[in-house]
Image (cartoon, rainbow, N blue to C red):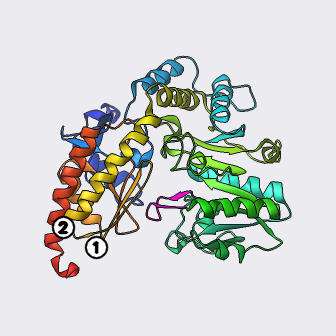
Amino acid sequence: MSIINKKPCELSSQEIRDLTSKYLMPNYRRLPVTVVRGQGSRVWDADGKEYLDLFPGWGVSGLGHCHPRVVEAVREQAGRIFHMANNFQVAEQAYFAQILSTKGSGQQCFFSNSGAEANEGAIKLARLYCQPKYKIITLMNSFHGRTFAAISATGQPSYQAGFTPVVPGFSYAILNDFESVKALVDDETAAIMVEPVQGEGGVIACDVQFLQSLRKLCTEKNMLLIFDEVQTSPARLGTWFGYQHFGVVPDIMTSAKSIAGGMPMGLIMARPEVAAALKPGTHASTFGGNSIGCAAGIATFQAIEEDGMLGNIKALGPVFDQMMGDLANDCSCVKAVRRTGFMIGIELAFDGAEVVQDCMDNGLLINCTHGTVLRMLPAFNITKDEISRGFEILGRCLKSAVAKNAGALA
């Protein structure tokens, strides 16, 4: 009898957990929730329980889950053509690239499947353009992905553990310390690569003056400035791309996460004269820029524009500020709150994993990064009522955590 006799959505929570344990590699710390359906900022598990999702898909579902415009674009495109090799002209790819370039600064595009791939390609492009220079300066506490050059660029030793020796040529400066960057520059330095806002590093933003100084230094030294915008674009900071929020234009930028409304997509954008270094044979991606992904990307940008999501992010930013401020006043465990656009961090005086679990038990999905920083990457179309509901649950869970950790806070 064939084992292929069920739809995955028909499995029970226990069946899903059992199959996961038996057949999937153990590289994820998987939560016990088995999500089978989503709509907007809400998801449901296999047992029918509803959750408010303030960290949808690790920031991938920027339009919320199953935005109708993206769903329809994928459905319509799937009935026409899934994928065509990149040595042919691909209509959806060309049109999406036009949208991206127009919303940006006239850059040219390369499509991949993920943020790590995009960063890997950006590193290759920087070395190609600047050869024989090859060194790249990144920042401590940065995160650039899980592929080999990406973990080498990542300024957190924990991500490199077990994989040494890493790719040579990377050095790590201090965030918002321009002199620490200058001290690492030599005649072999090709580029400086930074996240405008460090997400995995605790939701910490670069100062505008710091980025301006990096831009000036790169221009003076004939180096490239690379922005890793896998988390900050599109739209997350209230502008199409994160660099527009800071007013500093990089030579190369990368994006992924919410770029295609939930479909796998990575992106490199570069000044045309820099992009010209990627000559035929130097770089490629079999699935990158496939027609379904690009159709989803086009629909994503249309939805952001037509539904006024950039304005929603700017309008609701102060709502998050107010609620985080109230939380900090009410809960002694809150050490600091940080927000840039719809990237939200709440730093606690103790480990946040237990709080995340308690929130999940109470129907709220958030994340903890850097051990003690509660993180939210809400959908761009979230409502004020949904934010209020989320913070009501979070407040209760934090007060419970304070009671449990009274000794640590004394």
Give coordinates of residue 3: x percent, y percent.
Answer: 33, 36
Q: Vertical placement of 106 versus 323: above or below?
A: above
- Mark 1 or mark 2: name the one nearer the start of the chain: 1
Q: Is residue 241 visible?
A: yes
SS for callout 1: loop
| In the displayed structure image, the side of residue 199 where residue 133 appears, left or right | right
The CA distance from mark 1 to mark 2 is 9 Å
User: Which amino acid does the dot numbered 1 rest on?
Assistant: Phe
SS for callout 2: helix
As for residue 73 lying within the magenta part, the answer is no
- Residue in the picture at 19% in, 52% down: 393
Q: Vertical placement of 102 versus 53: above or below?
A: above
Write the start and end of the magenta stretch as one range: 195-206
* Dot 1 and dot 2 residues touching (CB under 8 Å): yes
- Residue in the picture at 23% in, 45% down: 388
- Residue in the picture at 68% in, 25% down: 90
84 or 381: nearer the viewer: 381
158 or 201: nearer the viewer: 201
Q: Give the image quarter of residue 120.
A: bottom right
Residue at the extreme right of the image, as rendered? 132
The dot on residue 401 is 2
| In the displayed structure image, the side of residue 12 where residue 192 appears, left or right | right
Q: Vertical placement of 296 versus 173: above or below?
A: above
Crowding at mark 1 (Cα within 10 Å: few <14, some 14-19, many 20+): some
As for residue 199 lying within the magenta part, the answer is yes
- Residue in the picture at 30% in, 71% down: 351
Circle 1 sits on which residue? 350
Q: Quadrant of the C terminus?
A: bottom left
Give coordinates of residue 98: x percent, y percent.
Answer: 67, 29
Q: Quadrant of the N terminus?
A: top left
User: Which amino acid does the dot numbered 2 rest on?
Assistant: Ala
Give coordinates of residue 278: x percent, y percent.
Answer: 79, 46
